Amino acid sequence: MCGIVGYIGQKNTKEILLEGLKELEYRGYDSAGIAVLSGGVFNSFKATGKLINLEEKTKEFQTKGFAVGIGHTRWATHGKPTELNAHPHVGESSYVVHNGIIENYAQLKKNLIDEGVTFLSQTDTEVIVHQFEKNLKTTKNAFDAFKKTIKELEGAYAILLVTKAEEEKIFFAKNGSPMLVGINEANEKYFASSDAPLIGHATDVNYFEDGDYGYVSADEIIIYDKNDTKKAPHFAKLATNKLSAQKDGYRFFMEKEIYEQSDVIADTLLGRVSEKEVLFEELDASLFEGINEIKLCACGTSYHAALTASYLFERYAKVKSTVEIASEFRYREPIMSKETLFVVISQSGETADTLETLKMAKNAGLKTLAICNVDNSSMVRLADATILARAGIEKGVASTKAFATQVTIFWMLSLYLAKRNNTLTQAAIEKQLELLRALPLCVKVQDSMHERIKRLSKRYLHGHGFFFIGRDIFFPLALEGALKLKEISYLHAEGYPSGEMKHGPIALADPELFTIALLPEHLLYEKSKSNVEELSARDSTICAISPLAFDKADDFIETKKQKDYMLEFFEMMVVVQLLSLEISVRLGNDVDMPRNLAKSVTVE
Ligand code: AGP
């Protein structure tokens, strides 16, 4: 989830760009850069780490008079967070910044290299500027070259490009990643990935739509739509509150991040799911050579993702999988075998307990893999291989989109291993790939569902506790739902295997015991249903979450009929996330910063 800014005007362009990048810090970044074209001269600066490093590099640089400029904060998806990989990326006389993923960059890059182009970075973005300059040589017109380049790109992008071929214009294109342009009475033009950087500068904004491309100068805004039809900008008044702008109008970052799950899962899938197979270009097949067991190790929500993975790895890839809580694994003097692949899962990549287990595995000579959301974090630097979650910065302490992208990666990895181990037929794999491609739509929050949960939440503000229950992969989801509720409502909740309730916990059943029952249609429905009926018969208050009507429930949250239990899993994930959110809101808690918690537990 990178951040983009652009400016056309007479003010100090460097200051405007740096200030805009600061307002995008909430999107997360590991490097940043700017490029300014003024008086026919380009000045460009890039730095890794915090924005202050970029400010330090640019402190001697000032722009006077008219200039065009672009800036970028990078959240690494392709290529390590280094200065070379930071944006803007340069051609011979052009610079580009980009948010998103160019799915067909490898082929474009190969063609360009075959034609003698030298690449400086490992990024997908750099192909854009070289492809543009290649096209410019034939079209002789910057806009035609830009248009041709955009048509050659596949994937998600928000692009700004500046070139000496048209010194007073910024070329833009938007498809799948957000971007807008703002104006004011001083005839200045501002670009950004969200409206926060424009507050206090622009008065009106035009939110580009997917497929929009064109150029902006001091005097005009030229927009073409995905059908190459010219269209007028549609301006709306700009919001005035920066924090609400960073929350994009949601009440909390956690709420925003639940709604973002559709987009970040799409990002996580990008370039990794073809018609025929799952592709992890970041993995070398040798990682799995000689491996007969996968051991997953994590904490908290990441542990729940790991538990979910263990079911999928054994079911689809027929590889023995075990799961460890990192703080336990560290001290129980575990027996480790070199035929075990050790997988750590962490949103932050800095959780102390998980990091220590990774060191233990490395010291024991095991091959290691990190599933992480922060590139260049300690675990990413230490593990033999990494799969990045591409969830963007997660500001809510209660993890949501990170969990969603972790499970998405594990689903993909189970299919990747199934193909490698020949444990699923090609037809079965392709059916799963079709389900994976339906995932972003499946987790899109429906207003009607959110409203239903908001209304329902008023009934669950007390009681002597909650049981979230489920079977198979819905057991780790039950654990996750219970953790979400505990974290942000401070009410006691347990996740439990449905089949285990009769082995003791059912003694707690009474009207004040709230049971949130996960009842997927396509996985052990009848068995789960009978477990819930046992509780209902003892007068426990039941809230059933299911696509199938269940008359023994006191409350019922109807989910969609899905083709497969994996889609039911993700839809019910959104339900339990929203349920904990709305209960917490009613209790007046700080949803984003719950008491006693930290976003990354870097101490034991
Ligand atoms: C999840 O909602 C919690 N914030 C917490 O359990 C978290 O998952 C855990 O601390 C692990 O963090 P990590 O994923 O960054 O390693």
Image (cartoon, helix red, strand yellow):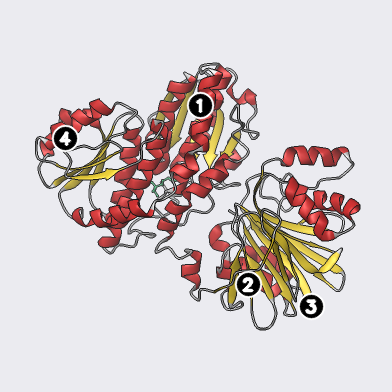
| Distance from Cα at disc 1 to Cα at disc 2 | 44 Å
Residue picked out by circle 4: 505
Query: For mark 3, what is the residue?
Result: 66
Closer to the camera in the image, 403 or 331: 403
Between the C-alphas of marks 2 and 3, the distance is 17 Å
x and y, in percent, of residue 320 in the image: 45, 20
User: To which residue does mark 1 refer?
Assistant: 431
Name the N-terminal-most of marks 2 and 3.
3
Q: Earlier in the sequence, mark 4 or mark 2?
A: 2
Label 4: which secondary element = helix
Labels 2 & 3 near each other (Cβ < 8 A): no
Expressed as whole percent of the image width and height from the top left, the position of residue 513 reads: 15, 44
Mark 1 lies on a secondary structure that is helix
Amino acid type at mark 1:
Lys
Q: Tell me: 130 left or right of 409.
A: right
Residue type (three-letter) at the residue carrying disc 3: Phe
- Number of the label disc, if any, that sits on residue 182: 2
- Say whether marks 1 and 2 touch (CB < 8 Å): no
Among the two numbered marks 1 and 2 on one chain, the one whose residue lies closer to the N terminus? 2
Closest to the camera, between mark 3 and mark 4, is 3
